[in-house]
């Protein structure tokens, strides 16, 4: 048996795992990433070429970097004004092979990172409550290897490491009562109109949302592999579609299989949400999360053959009209994708499995507008942002209660979902130390309905890798590290920890605005960094900052705006005859640059920091962004001292 030592071990070569591994390795930590399958990249190299994020506005760090590589690839290969460069939508849409190439390049560029594929987790050794090592072996059998590390990161879709280590977890759906979630539990929803149908009792159960594969199809005859009938073809699985077509509920191939275009005439083909018999296979994934790989492989095979049978049915079934079969006959697998798996993606879409119990549970309410605020709930320990509507795929097959309109559990409330923050507590597990879990996060079924998007997981994973480095540097368990110090590191890497509509990344004040936005300094998504700051607000902000790590030495503002320098004679002066302070500040409500510079000099001396030039320039008043930048600089310097 081999024994290996590393600083950080990441289990799972998913996008979340890649984000974690890159973050740790780039900070000089010896890092090992171990993946069960022969492939890395999870869904982002297995057909999900239309990344589920509305824009890059709420994305930062590693995912924004990834998207920039996608955009560069299409511009360099086909030209800046090419159709492919436009179709990639700033890097948010890509071919599976392109995703695979980019991930491989990013991983290979890190000398501190070792990637191991086709290895299974065998056991976990703990010292008290902390993971000390894990043992893995080749998937086909062979010699076991023990990996010891200071920090472990479970980036599997299934939460396998966390579960084996003894972290408690949930499966299934909570009821409305459990976390006060309006749309939790049993639900029948008309996906088109969002109308909630009778039978929606909101009761919890053990059901999980359906899985499928994200197919890469094309109409290009020169790059097409035909659909093949599987040996286990079961026509009854799809027979209901005949009546759907006759009744006009389904009007073509792309209303059974949702064909979203990606570059070079290919698709990211998903379940069609308005069709009651599509590529999802509700109920038949129930044993997947807790099953061993024999059980899981059987479920994966069933899903693969189900979809292969569906594609064959749509092109060949004699009871379907000729026009429908002709429409379906235009399509085939993209022949230049997934050549080693018969042009079928290797990774099943595990939308939901275990959800570990962490220090914070993310719910539907965290991704909706908070009562009284112009935004979602604020989290001081935010490590990333998410920007996708809460949804869930079906948990039951077709049944009469659905009225040929809905599958139970298939729902979406994107119209109610806001851009939201993800608290650090969501990836810190209960009961087990030296472990972070950025994919099987601590969330309800409803909360996971938005976090489960790959761009989001990738950024959470990146935050986990940075947290591992902070843990090693501070010699504290990941549970006990300074969240402020973690955020300092994340902000330095352009992570978005709160969405600010009027402050894009890259401005002189963006880090400060992000940091204080995560601390409820703004009631909505606007920071108004260019507006003049009042002395009232400046005093409040300084007082709040004194409660933050590193801020206890911050001095308050001078009580007077007219303090003479030492050596200048103050008299004669009759202060009783001057306006009272209340009268003065009422008539002079804004913080002046001169007053701010005096405060900054005092603050620098008290905190043993550089004064900086935050209030330089020829304007008389100080902006909100300038003051926030100064405050953040002083806090960060104190934390680094």
Image (spheres, grey):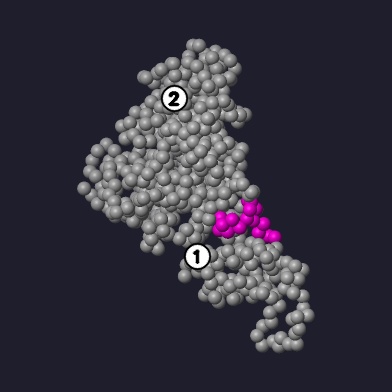
**Horizontal and vertical percent position of residue 363:** 51, 43
Which of the two residues, 104 or 389, is positioned nearer the viewer here? 389
Secondary structure type for disc 1 = loop
Magenta region: which residues?
Answer: 514-531
Question: In percent of the image, x 65 and y 74: which residue is there?
Answer: 558
Question: In percent of the image, x 60 and y 45: which residue is there?
Answer: 369
**Horizontal and vertical percent position of residue 486:** 47, 58
Residue lying farthest front? Answer: 177
The residue that label 1 is drawn on is: 549
The mark found on residue 297 in the picture is: none
CA gap, disc 2 to disc 1? Answer: 54 Å
Q: Mark 2 or mark 1, which has the lower sequence index?
A: 2
Q: Can residue 494 be seen in this view?
A: no
Q: Can residue 99 be seen in this view?
A: yes
Secondary structure type for disc 2 = helix
**Horizontal and vertical percent position of residue 92:** 54, 41
Question: In percent of the image, x 40 and y 30: which residue is there?
Answer: 285
The residue that label 2 is drawn on is: 307
Residue lying farthest top? Answer: 318
Q: Say above or below: 238 vs 57.
A: above
Quarter of image, res 38: top left
Q: As drawn, is 530 to the left or to the right of 294? A: right
**Horizontal and vertical percent position of residue 89:** 58, 41
Q: Say above or below: 225 vs 536.
A: above
Circle 2 residues within 10 Å: few <14, some 14–19, many ≥20: many
Which numbered mark, 2 or 1, is in the foreground of this view? 1
Residue 58 located within the stretch drawn in magenta: no
């Amino acid at each position: 048996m081999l024994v290996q030592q590393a600083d950080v071990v990441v289990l799972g070569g998913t996008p979340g795992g890649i984000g974690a591994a890159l973050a740790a390795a780039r900070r000089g930590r010896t890092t090992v990433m171990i993946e069960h399958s022969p492939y890395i990249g999870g869904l982002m190299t297995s057909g999900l070429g239309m990344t589920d994020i509305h824009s890059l506005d709420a994305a930062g760090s590693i995912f924004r970097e990834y998207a920039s590589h996608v955009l560069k690839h299409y511009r360099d290969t086909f030209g800046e004004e090419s159709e492919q460069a436009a179709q990639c939508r700033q890097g948010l849409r890509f071919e599976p092979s392109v995703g695979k190439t980019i991930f491989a390049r990013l991983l290979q560029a890190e000398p501190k990172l070792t990637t191991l594929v086709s290895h299974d987790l065998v056991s976990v050794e703990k010292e008290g409550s902390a993971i000390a090592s894990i043992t893995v072996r080749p998937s086909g059998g062979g010699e076991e290897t023990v990996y010891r590390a200071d920090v472990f990161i479970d980036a599997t879709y299934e939460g396998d490491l966390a579960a084996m280590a003894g972290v408690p977890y949930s499966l299934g759906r909570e009821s409305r009562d459990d976390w006060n979630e309006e749309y939790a539990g049993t639900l029948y929803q008309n996906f088109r109109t969002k109308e909630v149908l009778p039978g929606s009792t909101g009761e919890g159960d053990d059901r999980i949302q359906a899985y499928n594969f994200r197919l890469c199809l094309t109409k290009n005859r020169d790059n097409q592999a035909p659909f093949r009938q599987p040996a286990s073809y079961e026509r009854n699985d799809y027979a209901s579609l005949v009546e759907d077509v006759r009744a006009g509920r389904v009007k073509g191939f792309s209303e059974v299989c949702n064909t979203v275009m990606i570059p070079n005439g290919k698709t990211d083909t998903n379940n069609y949400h308005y069709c009651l018999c599509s590529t999802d296979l509700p109920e038949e994934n129930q044993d997947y999360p807790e099953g061993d790989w024999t059980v899981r492989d059987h479920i994966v095979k069933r899903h693969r053959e189900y979809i292969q049978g569906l594609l064959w049915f749509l092109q060949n079934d004699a009871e379907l009209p000729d026009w429908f079969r002709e429409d379906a006959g235009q399509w085939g697998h993209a022949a230049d994708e997934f050549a080693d798996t018969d042009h079928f993606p290797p990774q099943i879409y595990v939308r939901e499995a275990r959800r570990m119990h962490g220090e914070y549970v993310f719910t539907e309410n965290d991704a909706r507008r908070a009562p009284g605020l112009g935004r979602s709930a604020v989290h001081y320990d935010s490590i990333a942002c998410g920007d996708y509507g809460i949804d869930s795929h079906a948990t039951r097959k077709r049944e009469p209660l659905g009225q040929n309109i809905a599958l139970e559990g298939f729902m979406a409330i994107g119209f109610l979902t806001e851009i939201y923050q993800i608290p650090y507590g969501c990836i810190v597990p209960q009961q087990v130390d030296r472990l972070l879990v950025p994919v099987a996060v601590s969330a309800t079924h409803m909360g996971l309905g938005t976090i489960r998007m790959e761009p989001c997981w990738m950024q959470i994973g990146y935050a986990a890798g940075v947290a591992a480095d902070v843990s090693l540097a501070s010699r504290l368990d990941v549970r006990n590290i300074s969240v402020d110090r973690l955020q300092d590191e994340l902000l330095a890497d352009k992570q978005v920890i709160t969405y600010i509509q009027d402050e894009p990344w890259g401005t002189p004040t963006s880090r400060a605005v992000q940091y204080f936005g995560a601390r409820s300094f703004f009631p909505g998504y606007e920071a108004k960094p260019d507006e003049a700051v009042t002395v009232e607000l400046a005093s409040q902000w300084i007082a709040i900052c004194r409660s933050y790590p590193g801020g206890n030495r911050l001095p308050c503002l001078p009580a007077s705006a007219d303090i003479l320098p030492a050596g200048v004679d103050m008299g004669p002066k009759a202060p009783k005859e001057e306006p009272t302070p209340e009268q003065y500040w009422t008539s002079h409500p804004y913080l002046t640059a001169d007053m701010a510079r005096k405060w900054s000099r005092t603050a620098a001396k008290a905190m043993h920091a550089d004064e900086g030039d935050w209030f330089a320039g020829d304007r008389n008043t100080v902006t909100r962004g300038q003051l926030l930048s100064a405050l953040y600089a002083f806090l960060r310097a104190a934390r680094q001292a």
